[in-house]
Amino acid sequence: MTTTQGAPRDANGGDAGTAYETVEVDVDGAVATITLNRPDRINALSPQLRADLEAALADLKPGDAVRVIRIRGAGRGFCSGYDMDSGSSIYKMAPGTGEQAEPPAPGTRSMVELGESSVVLDRERIREGIERWLAMMSYRKPIVSQVHGYCLAGGLDLIGVTDVVYAAEDAKFGHPAGRGLGIPPTLGLLPQKIGLARAKEFFFTGDTVDGVEAERLGIVNKVFPADHLDDATMALCRRMAQVPLDALTLHKSVINRWGEIMGMRLGALEGAEFDALFHVTPASVEFGKISGSQGLREALAWRDGPFRS
């Protein structure tokens, strides 16, 4: 196996792309592994991590020497969600929670001088993020998620657009932020993947489920003991990679087409409307105020306290 911390290597050991800051790429025969590498943040999805992930996928896209992509996380978890501390996080402080300058007197500015609504700008930003996830879903090669530890919030968006998900039995899946902050913009495509009633039960509490329950619900394909997960996932990726790439691509495309006919793409894009609305609810605004004045830890304690009894 060729292991790199910068650019991926092709099958002959040559440089196959640009360097990345927050992912590592290993190519082992026909299987390429992208490792999310922000272990100190449990691989929270910062703008840099998303950019590096997309760049790595772009570098691995040409040719058929690599036929299957595996995504895993470094450290103690797969992905803790969107990085709420990053400036362009999808969970930016809700509109109206920052310090406001004294507004001009009513009627002293024309309509066009008033600028844009913060809610509309929020919707546009979320929609752009959803489009990026949907582009990843349409990637021509199969993508397999290997989940250990936490897979929360934005982690659900990530595994939702990959083709197959294998997980450790003790992995944790959930969206605690749904208690008062926002939704995973694509909802991890869970309404379609596991059904409406199960998706509602999953999101109504914000509770986490382990890998075994996630398999029962249909969030993941298979689970394995944690110490067998890496080998088992790699073996299944190698099995897939024995199929010619054009066959894999056509299978993936036609199955995705069924999903699109059933409304998957439209449903995912609707997330921008509802997440932007969620960000101006009193609970979300209050969370932003607490986070801004007392820190994220205090805001999380305020949000999750009633659920610890």
Image (tube, helix red, strand yellow):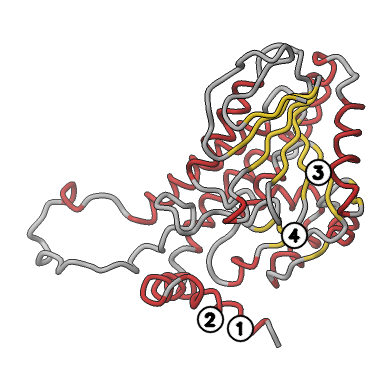
Say which quarter of the image contains residue 244.
Answer: top right
Label 1 and label 2: CA atoms lie apart by 6 Å
Residue picked out by circle 1: 305
Q: Are marks 1 and 4 in contact (CB under 8 Å)?
A: no
Disc 4 residue crowd, few under 14, some 14–19, many 20+, Cα 10 Å: many
| Alpha carbon separation for disc pair 4 and 2 | 21 Å
Q: Which mark is residue 173?
A: 4
Q: Residues within 10 Å of mark 1 (few under 14, many from 20)?
A: few
Residue 158, given in percent of the width and then of the height, sits at 66, 44
List the single residue furthest toward the left.
108
Asked whether the beta carbons under mark 2 and mark 3 sit within 8 Å of each other, the answer is no
Image height of 239 relative to 170, above or below:
above
Q: Earlier in the sequence, mark 2 or mark 3?
A: 3
Task: Quote the CA–CA distance across marks 1 and 3.
Answer: 31 Å
Percent from the top left, x then y, of residue 293? 36, 75
State how far apart marks 3 and 4 are (Cα).
12 Å
Assess whether mark 2 and mark 1 are in contact (beta carbons under 8 angstroms): yes
In the image, is residue 305 above or below residue 35? below
Q: Which residue bears the numbered disc 2?
A: 302
**Residue 69 placed where, x, y %?**
74, 29
Q: Which residue is mark 3?
A: 165
**Helix, strand or loop at mark 2:** helix
- Foreground pick, 120 / 93: 93
Disc 1/disc 4 C-alpha distance (Å): 19 Å
At mark 4, the secondary structure is strand
In the rendered structure, the answer to whether residue 1 lies left or right of residue 206 reads: right
Residue type for callout 1: Gly
- Kind of element beneath mark 1: helix
Task: Give x and y (percent) for residue 95.
Answer: 36, 62
Q: Is residue 204 left or right of residue 124?
A: right
**N-term-proximal mark, 1 vs 3:** 3
User: Circle 3: is it few (<14), some (14-19), or many (20+) Cα within 10 Å?
Assistant: many
